[in-house]
Image: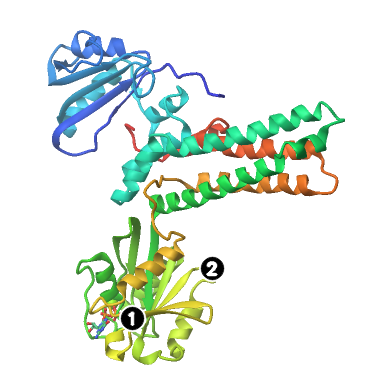
Amino acid sequence: MARAPAAVDTIAAIATPPGRGGVGIVRVSGGGVAGIAAGVLGRVPPPRVATFATFRGARGEPLDCGIALSFPAPASFTGEDVLELHGHASPVGLGLLLARCLELGARLAQPGEFTRRAFLNGKLDLAQAESVADYIEAATATAARAAVRSLSGEFSREVRALVEGVTQLRMFTEATLDFPDEDIEFLRASDAAGKLRALRAALAALLAKAATGVRLAQGLAVVLVGRPNVGKSSLLNRLVREDAAIVTAIPGTTRDTVERPAAIGGIPLTVIDTAGLRDTADEVERLGIERTRAAIARADLALLLVDARESADALHPDDAAVLASLPAGLPRLVVHNKADLAAAAPRVERREARTHVWLSALTGAGLDLLEREVLAIAGVASVPEDAFIARERHLAALREAAARLDEAGAQFASPAPALELFAESLREAQDALSAITGEFTADDLLGAIFARFCIGK
Ligand SMILES: Nc1nc2c(ncn2[C@@H]2O[C@H](COP(=O)(O)OP(=O)(O)OP(=O)(O)O)[C@@H](O)[C@H]2O)c(=O)[nH]1
Ligand SMILES: [Mg+2]
């Protein structure tokens, strides 16, 4: 495993979130922990025993009292000597305690630096380290559970199993290359093609799971658009299950965008209600419509709301104009709202290569149909029990590996296979997969990953 040498300097940070509360923790890691323990506590506490102590400043004055915990290397989160000082969560008090540690030789930790050290010291692989941040950021219980599964190594295990399979096939091919007389026939006889197919299928399954994992981590930004008064704010309130936006019968009620978190089947959503789109001389409404355009630009999915009374056979020209004005690549659903007034049954129809949902934001009828279609567009039919969390970076690596395996397959299937190229594609697939767990990862990528953590993690 290619890993950088362990850092030896000592880092410190407040590990608990800012604010006042019962317990606040300063965490210290590195070669200077014993000296810092001696300076603050007068001694190094016995390993892994909660030890009540007074935390002292440079002149011996008490700063706080609480629990001190010592984790000697390598049995610690970072793999280095670690000291945790559990004091009271007073922002000023914790600041003084941290300053004391810095005075005794530690330096302030960078964002994610504890977890980075855990990775560099082999305590976690890269996918696990990333899932620490994803757990902290999780927006739904399902996402949190998925992050814990990644943290415990379930995703990494599946990736490693694939790496193992690809490596074996590559080794076998390369060994065959050393005996030119046998080469391709020998590989054929050993069912290399079948093994490759099995690996490719396993990779496809992992890709699908990882895509769900990315959705769990990132969620989906859903923007509600349409002409004034079609019921956008009413639908927002339904989706987020609170009265977040003002609803009135007056067209042009919503001026500003209103953004709220929601969830469908454990997938986090950000639902954005917007000002109705129309030509207007009203300055405030006009600015609101500009914000609508900005919200559309950052959405993953647009729900175009129309009035079901006006859209029985075809869209009203004004609705068609709004639809045509959406960015080309933006997935969309047409929602025929006020189905209750149109005496239309809640239903889903595919019309002109688009999905149409009839519902009533007022009564809630048909909302379940909409939720199902939203999940389908997110590429998630349902979140499986054994879901894990994942990132775009992982998806890109899995897709790269899939392309290289396809290349290998094409080579093998050609009339005159070049086994060197077959082996080379396998090696590239193996490298792409290894980047997920960090066996093969550039330093600048590591920097980018850990910089997104908060300080103290
Ligand atoms: N009967 C019925 N009335 C609805 C339904 N949805 C919304 N309404 C009513 O339609 C009116 C407009 O609803 P809003 O949710 O404010 O519409 P909007 O699209 O946000 O309007 P603007 O903010 O002005 O663009 C209100 O009187 C709602 O009670 C529905 O499904 N059925
Ligand atoms: Mg509104």
Q: Is residue 447 visible?
A: no
Residue 183 sits above or below residue 328 on the image? above
Residue extending farthest right: 181
Residue 90 sits above or below residue 328 on the image? above
Upstream in the sequence, badge 1 or badge 2? Answer: 2
Who's the residue at 39% across and 49% down the image? 217
Q: Is residue 51 visible?
A: yes
Q: Nearer the viewer, mark 1 or mark 2?
A: 1
x and y percent of residue 347 in the render?
Answer: 37, 80
Identify the residue position indicated by label 2 in the image: 329
x and y percent of residue 329 in the render?
Answer: 54, 68
Who's the residue at 32% across and 13% down the image? 72
Taking the image as shown, residue 94 lies to the left or right of residue 254, namely: left
Looking at the image, what colour scheme do you see? rainbow
Task: Report the amino acid beneath label 1.
Answer: Pro
Q: Which image quarter is the N terminus in?
A: top right
Label 1: element kind: loop
Which numbered tag is attached to residue 346? 1
Q: Which picture quadrant has residue 79?
A: top left
Q: Which picture quadrant has residue 231?
A: bottom left
Residue 352 sits above or below residue 158 on the image? below
Taking the image as shown, residue 341 lies to the left or right of residue 223, namely: left
Task: Report the amino acid beneath label 2.
Answer: Gly
Who's the residue at 34% across and 20% down the image? 76
